[in-house]
Image (cartoon, helix red, strand yellow):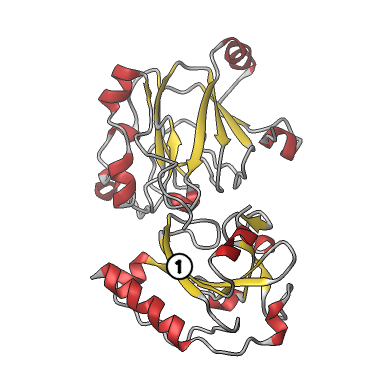
Amino acid sequence: MLTRRAALGVGGGLLVNAGFSDLVRAKSAELIEIHMKSDPGGGVVGFDPIGVLLQPGQTVRWVCDDNVHTATTYSPTNDNHSLRIPTNAQPWASDFLLPQQTFEVTLTVEGIYDYFCAPHEEAGMVGRLIVGSAVGPGALPFDYYLTQGHNWKSVPPAAQKSFPAVETILTQKIVRSSLNFSKMPMK
Amino acid sequence: MFRKTLIALGIMMLVAGPTVAAESVEKAPPPAPYKKVSELVKLPDFLPGMGTLYVDPATLPDGPFLAYDHAGKLVSTIYMIPLKDIDGHKTMDDLKAPGGNVDHVSLYYNAGHPGVEVPHYHVVLWHVTKAQEKLVEK
């Protein structure tokens, strides 16, 4: 399996807000894999699981199964998207991942992390992570920033509808995608 | 209404397609200004179901994209029409069709990909028979 670590050759992936002690702790924590999926025709796309409850220090690995995808946080540094990760967390944006390529982050700052796939955001390919507790901008309504004078991009309607509810993630811990990635043949 | 518009678009392309293939695009690579899509954006060289794509960047996102099989033979001409343009009743006039005879047409939804990062429809003018679509299946 190819990984961003192998491709970049600089330590791989991105360790978000992780100090040495966090790295040590992360190694002992369960690694969560999120698959980036698509039907053969590229009409049905999504993350699976779409929602995950994590503990601080846990590592998330995105695995591209089909098509081309990214894992990109909702944050102004990513093409002026609205901020939907904790204010003191470091945003990330993977490169385009081809099948069998992976990307990892280790999360230490508590809160909600909303992220999207760059080529499929308009189609509603988004995911939500909750690290520890459900706090931060991700807990606010999608248009919260308008009253703060920010000129950020809004979350597309299809994406807004796709996020699993915070309560569902807190209850189920892992929320699987409801999409059928094999139902649509190419032609 | 949306589906009728797409079907009408496909029929118009089928009827309006030229009957003589331009020699220069029958084999890959087609001449400039066409460029290999995988060299413009991050996509595999060969896309299962479509083939190896070339496009004139000035025509993005609509195309035409020229699709070739593993042997470098032109199999289809593909237009990628954003749903918002269809919903907005945008007119797309004089889309080039350099690939020659059209055997049949396929229209299918795509959620997006590098280069056309919005939901769109692929309108595919096949220059080979239905059975020969297998040339680009894998």
Where B137 falls versus A124 (above or below)?
Answer: below
Counting every numbered tag in the picture gives 1
Q: Is A106 or A45 nearer to us in this picture? A: A45
**SS at circle 1:** strand
Q: Is residue A124 visible?
A: yes
Q: Is B77 or A153 nearer to us in this picture? A: B77
Q: Is residue A113 visible?
A: no
Q: Which residue is mark 1?
A: B106
Residue at position x 73%, y 72% from top?
B28
Quadrant housing the N terminus of chain A: top right
Q: Quadrant of residue A59?
A: top right
Does A98 sit left or right of A166 as displayed?
right
Where residue A70 appears, as percent x and y from the top left, is 53, 44
Packing grade of label 1 (10 A; few <14, some 14-19, many >=20) is some
Residue at position x 60%, y 54% from top?
B48
Where residue A43 appears, as percent x and y from the top left, is 43, 52
Where residue A82 appears, as percent x and y from the top left, is 38, 46
Residue at position x 46%, y 72% from top?
B105
Where B121 falls versus A109 (above or below)?
Answer: below
Where A17 falls versus A127 (above or below)?
Answer: above
Amino acid identity at mark 1: Ser
Does B51 sit left or right of B18 as displayed?
right
Where B71 falls versus A44 (above or below)?
Answer: below
Q: Is A54 or B49 nearer to us in this picture? A: B49
Chain bearing tag 1 is: B
Q: Is A103 or A37 nearer to us in this picture? A: A37
Where residue A146 appears, as percent x and y from the top left, is 27, 50
